[in-house]
Image: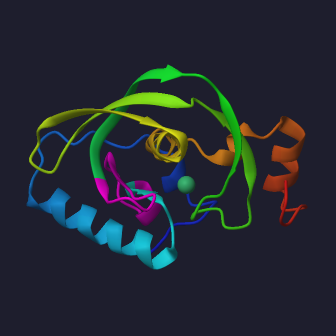
Amino acid sequence: MEIQYLPNTCLRKKAAKVLKVSEEEKRILDEMAKVMYLKGGVGLAACQVGIDRQLVVVDIGDGLIKLINPAIVKKEGLENQEEGCLSIPEAAVNVKRAKKIIVEYLNEQGEPIKISAQGLLARVIQHEVDHLLGKLIIDYLNPLKRLLFSNRLTIRKL
Ligand code: ZN
């Protein structure tokens, strides 16, 4: 597995839903976790390694969570914080996200799970769910900064 970087179009696609959780999904999730740890990330979506499936791994330092077909069903509060992305190493973007969320997903056994998350965990899950929709942190920039970024006129801090 290789990390896919912008402007790779796979990062802009809506990821396909997993219809049945099989051994293959488990294998992909394990590989994704390895890549995430190797790159020092706190979350990774399958499209970031070129796989068109709704698979996400997250670990903010208190254990690995594997999410299949994650969907945020409730959002509460707003918080602004700087984020990075393994697929856009040169970007650091302030993103306004919900403070608290409720997310539904399938676990590796294909069982439906519902958890509430807040703080960093909520932020990372929202970032990864964005990936599954083809949405990236640079989409939260204002139009001018976004244009500058896409023209590669700015380097580090946006
Ligand atoms: Zn990302």
| Relative depth, front residue between 1 and 104 | 104
55 on left or right of 123 = left
Based on the picture, tell me whether residue 133 belongs to the magenta stretch: no
Q: Please provide the residue range marked out in magenta.
A: 47-65
Q: Residue at x 29, y 71 (%)?
A: 31
Q: Position of residue 45 (x, y in %)?
A: 42, 54
Q: Position of residue 135 (x, y in %)?
A: 57, 41
In this view of the protein, which residue sits in the foreground, 147 or 113?
Answer: 113
Residue 14, percent across and down? 43, 40
Left or right: residue 134 compared with residue 22: right
* Vertical position of residue 153 compared to residue 100: above or below: below
Q: Among all residues in the image, which is located at the extreme front?
A: 62
Looking at the image, which residue is at 26% across and 61% down? 29
Q: Which of the 4 quarters of the picture holds residue 16?
A: top left
Q: Quadrant of ligand 1?
A: bottom right
Which residue occupies the foreground of this view, 115 or 41? 115
Q: Is residue 142 left or right of residue 47?
A: right
64 inside magenta stretch: yes
> Which sits in the foreground, 143 or 70?
70
User: How far across and how far down the image is residue 94, in percent?
Assistant: 75, 44
Q: Residue at x 15, y 51 (%)?
A: 108
Q: Is residue 14 left or right of residue 127?
A: left
